Amino acid sequence: MFVLNWYWLNERSKPAAEFVKEVENQRDQWKNDLKEQLDSNGIIQLDLSKSDKTAAALEERARKLDGKPKAIAEALLSVNSKMRALATRYEIATKNFTEAGGADASTMQTIEQIQSRENLAIEVKEANSSLIEFLSEIDIYLNSALSKAGLTLEESENAIQSYKKGANIDIVLAIRKLDMQITKDMIMVFNLLKREFGNWRTQGKNVIFDRSLAATNFNAVGKRIDDAFNKQVQLQKQFVR
C-alpha cells in the first residue's frame, strides 16, 4: 500500500508524460490486484516482491527524465524507498507472527510458547510504530527530499499534496493506527493467557476459562479486535476505489 503514488510534474515533455503514464498504469494495476484480493479473500495481503518490481520499473523510467521533472521524480522516489523499507520490516514481522500461529491459543501449550508469541507481536507493534511515525511526518520527509529540486514554494506544495492524495496517506495512516490497536489488544490476550495459565483450555480455536472474570475480559478484548479488523476492511475498500 506504500508503493504507488501520483507524481506531479510541471513540464509536459514526452519523457515526463511517459513517466506520469507509467505511474498511473502501475497504480491502477496495483489497486486492481488489491481489489481482487478483497473481493475473493475479504482481506488484503501484500506481495512485497511485486512492489520491488514496480519500484524498479519507475526508477528505470525516471532515469530517462531530465531537468526539473527528473529532480522531482528522484525526490519522490527516495521518499518511497524509505517508506518501502519500513513497510518491508512490518510485513516480515507480521509474516513471522502469523506463520507462528498468531493469537491462536491452541498453538501455545506452555508459558514459554505464549511469551515467544508475545515477543513476535511486540516486533509487529514496533515495526508498525515506525511506519506510523513516518506517515505522520510525511510532509517533513517530502519537503526535505524536494528541497534540492529547485522548486518554488507553490510547486513544492503541489508536489506534496499530489503525492499524499495519490498515496491515500490519510487512509493508510488510519489503517496503521487500527492495526496498532489490534496488536496491543493481542498482547493483552497473551498477558491474560500467561496470568491464567493452568486455568484455561482450548476447544478448537475457542478458549474456555475456569474463571468467569477472565472469560469476560478475554471476550471484551476479542470484540475490540474484531471491531477494529472490520473497520480496517472498510478502509481498505475505500483505498482501492
Image (cartoon, rainbow, N blue to C red):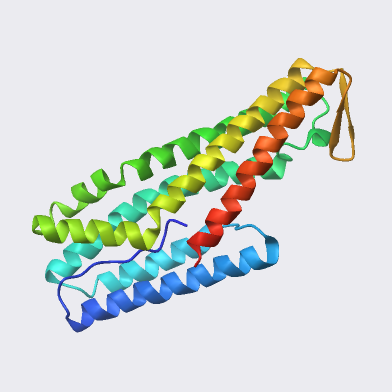
Residue 123 in view: yes
Count of numbered badges drawn on the protein: 0
Foreground of the two, 87 or 32? 32
Residue 46, given in percent of the width and then of the height, sits at 56, 58
* Left-right relation of 75 to 148: right
Q: Identify the residue at horizontal 14%, vertical 51% (top origin).
A: 147
Residue 149, given in percent of the width and then of the height, sits at 13, 58
Q: Identify the residue at horizontal 42%, vertical 40% (top origin).
A: 132
* Left-right relation of 197 to 63: right
Residue with the most extreme bottom position = 14
Q: Identify the residue at horizontal 35%, vertical 72% (top origin).
A: 23
* Left-right relation of 183 to 161: right
Residue 108, given in percent of the width and then of the height, sits at 80, 31
Residue 75 in view: no
Compared with 3, 115 (above or below) is above
Foreground of the two, 140 or 70? 140
The picture quadrant where one finds residue 136 is top left
Residue 201, given in percent of the width and then of the height, sits at 89, 27
Q: Identify the residue at horizontal 17%, vertical 81% (top origin).
A: 13
Compared with 119, 69 (above or below) is below
